[in-house]
Image (cartoon, grey):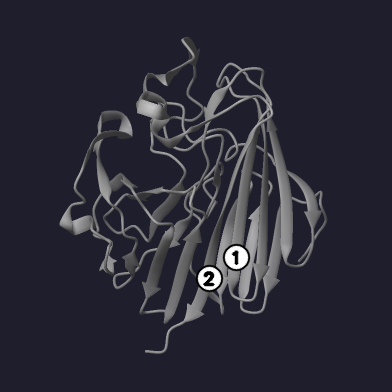
Amino acid sequence: MSGSADMEEIRIADGDLQISLSRLGGAIHSASFRGRAFMVAAGGADGGSASFPLVPFGNRVGDNVMTVGGRDYCFRPNTADPLYLHGDGWLGLWDIVSLSRQQVDMTFRHAADDLSPYSYQASQSFSISGNCLVNTLSVTNSGDAPLPFGLGFHPYFLLTAQMSLTAPARHFWAERDGHLPDRRGQVPELLDFSRPRTVPPQWINNAFEGWDGRARLVWPELKLMAEIEADPVFGNYMIYTPGGEADFFCFEPMTHLPNGHHMPEFGGLVVLQPGESLAGQMAISLSALEI
């Protein structure tokens, strides 16, 4: 660990696992195991984030509007994208509540404004023990009306030619204009990660539904493996990669489907009454492969 609670960047470590964090976006800037980076700084508020939180929900809102309880709520773009994207937490400055060699606790507050009708308080913690990183995220509705909330994580994992992903899912959502989900259907063979499969070098920006919260990433070139275990509330995930020669892909556990605001039962988003909360965690365990 270095620095104080007023600094912009923080490092935590235990044994072979080291993480660098930033207050901006409550983001991970770098993550390495035995000196090998397994995340890539390729996104976020400053383009230098290797993972960031999705709160009070993830992905886009179609037409920048939602209807809750017969009332319309409007959004405005919060990035260069024409649709409001990924909530506010990934763009805001988080406050550090506590800091130790192996753990950081942060909070973030947002009041409804001209970009978003959401008022909430979010909490996030990062803890390292041995070879395991645990990222916990929670949100509390601090507004005066019930609204649909969701959570997610947006890590940018290193993508190599031989890297394989295992993450079984029951359904697949095609993509339509605006990077919104189109229709639910069968998982296509090329993207069926029920067994270990390399991520194809093509544009992918799709939601997978009916996930059991477990995934495995294997990098034979690095003799490295990462096992993900997310709480049951995370029943979906997104995969994003621009394809081509990109050196990363995003595997994003989410409590809900993208554009859930326009789906039956809000696509898994949870309607929180004022004062109610939603929470969940993701653990990433690293190990060396014996090849």
Q: Which mark is residue 133?
A: 1
Give the quarter of the image for residue 198: bottom left
33 in relation to 69, above or below? below
- Report the side of 286 relative to 187 (left or right): right
Q: Is mark 1 in CB contact (under 8 Å) with mark 2?
A: yes
- Residue at far left of view: 189
Front-most of residues 242 and 232:
232
Q: Earlier in the sequence, mark 1 or mark 2?
A: 1
Front-most of residues 167 and 252:
167
Q: How many marks?
A: 2
Amino acid at circle 2: Ser
- Report the side of 188 relative to 278 (left or right): left
Amino acid at circle 1: Leu
Mark 2 residue crowding within 10 angstroms, few (<14) / some (14–19) / many (20+): some
- Residue at far top of view: 71
Mark 1 residue crowding within 10 angstroms, few (<14) / some (14–19) / many (20+): many
- Residue at far bottom of view: 291
Residue drawn 79% across the image and 58% down it:
99
Q: Which mark is residue 285?
A: 2
Residue drawn 63% across the image and 38% down it:
139
The percent position of residue 85, horizontal first and vertical second, equals: 46, 32
